[in-house]
Image (cartoon, helix red, strand yellow):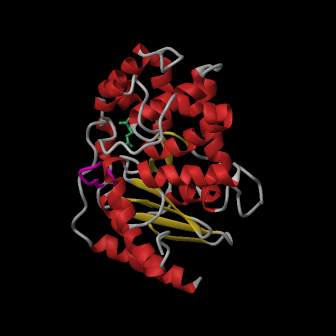
Amino acid sequence: MPDLDRIVREIAEEMAARTDRGDVATYIPELARADPNRFGIAVVSGEGEVVVGGDADMAFSIQSISKVFTLTLALGKIGNLLWKRVGREPSGSPFNSIVQLENEHGIPRNPFINAGAIAVTDVILSGHQPREALGEILRFLQFLAEDPAIGIDEAVAASEQRTGFRNRALANYMKSFGVLENPVDYTLGVYFHHCAIAMSCRQLAMAGRFLAHNGRNPATGFSVVSPERARRINAIMLTCGHYDGSGEFAYRVGLPGKSGVGGGILAVAPGRASIAVWSPGLDASGNSHLGRIALEELTRRLGWSIFG
Ligand code: GLN
């Protein structure tokens, strides 16, 4: 696609030239070391074409983007029973908010805020040792991205283990309502480590292909999830993937997407492509500032918004 090549190259150049970059996350000390001047983009089309720009092969901390894949695994494990443990409504609150847990008897609003993702991780962990559960999540990503080199940044995981007091509070609060089955420290250990998986834009865009193509890997035809499940995961990404910035992301970009405080965003253009962008500077909602702008430009220039 000559247009796609040109547009991705132009966007990478435009983003590199910008001086507004947002602020790198510092509440996880190890993430504060990220370079705000980085920008990467990768687009993988249904035909298998991979178009990249900027720092597309540099690994970064995927953080909450991992929650798309843990949701997929938990649905694979217990199906719709998952919705007894976590809701699927947007929260309109920050990613680490505790306020709604009290009203909803410890049931988190959705699987993409921290509380919800911790509950999802607990589902994956049940019946396994933490190491096995983490291995399953990591192998799933390696399989989807077709890259066995994907690993965990242990320094980031250790940094969050030391400082994740808010997540510990969320987990303890849910445990008090019986929403978590496993020891809180085990569940949090798996959660912190899957957030600390390091991937490049290229690897992430490869891993997201099944969501853009009715649950199938378009290269091999292999079915990862049913078309219905892919559609529903995309729906939750659209409504909840950017926390209290989800409405703004839908308004500006018009694609299902999931952000992480490492500055990455995975976006899905159904029937067209899987897209990953990365720039560590964040906006007030904890979403990549330039990542969002780059996606807005990409969908505008290609006419890829799902809203026509
Ligand atoms: N590991 C991070 C946390 O729990 C993930 C948050 C995010 O990426 N929004 O705070």
Answer above or below: position of 141 versus 162.
below
Residue appearing at x 70%, y 58% in the figure: 217
Place residue 114 in its image quadrant: top left
Residue at the front extreme, as displayed: 103
Q: Picture coordinates of residue 197 (x, y %)?
A: 50, 41
Answer above or below: position of 126 versus 52.
above
Q: Picture coordinates of residue 205 (x, y %)?
A: 55, 59
Q: Give the magenta part as a residue range.
A: 281-287
Residue at the bottom extreme, as displayed: 2
Q: Is residue 291 visible?
A: no
Query: Between residues 112 and 33, which one lies in front from this camera angle?
Result: 112
Answer above or below: position of 16 versus 37.
below
Label total for image: 0
Residue 282 lies within the magenta run: yes
Residue appearing at x 30%, y 34% in the figure: 97
Residue 191 lies within the magenta run: no
Q: Is residue 287 visible?
A: yes
Residue appearing at x 34%, y 40% in the figure: 95
By secondary structure, the bulk of the magenta-drawn segment is best described as loop
Query: Between residues 41 and 35, which one lies in front from this camera angle?
Result: 41
Residue at the right extreme, as displayed: 221
Residue appearing at x 60%, y 29% in the figure: 124
Q: Picture coordinates of residue 110 (x, y %)?
A: 45, 39
Q: Seen in the image, is 297 located left or right of residue 128?
A: left
Q: Picture coordinates of residue 191 (x, y %)?
A: 47, 30
Q: Quadrant of the N terminus?
A: bottom right
Query: Between residues 184 and 43, which one lies in front from this camera angle?
Result: 184
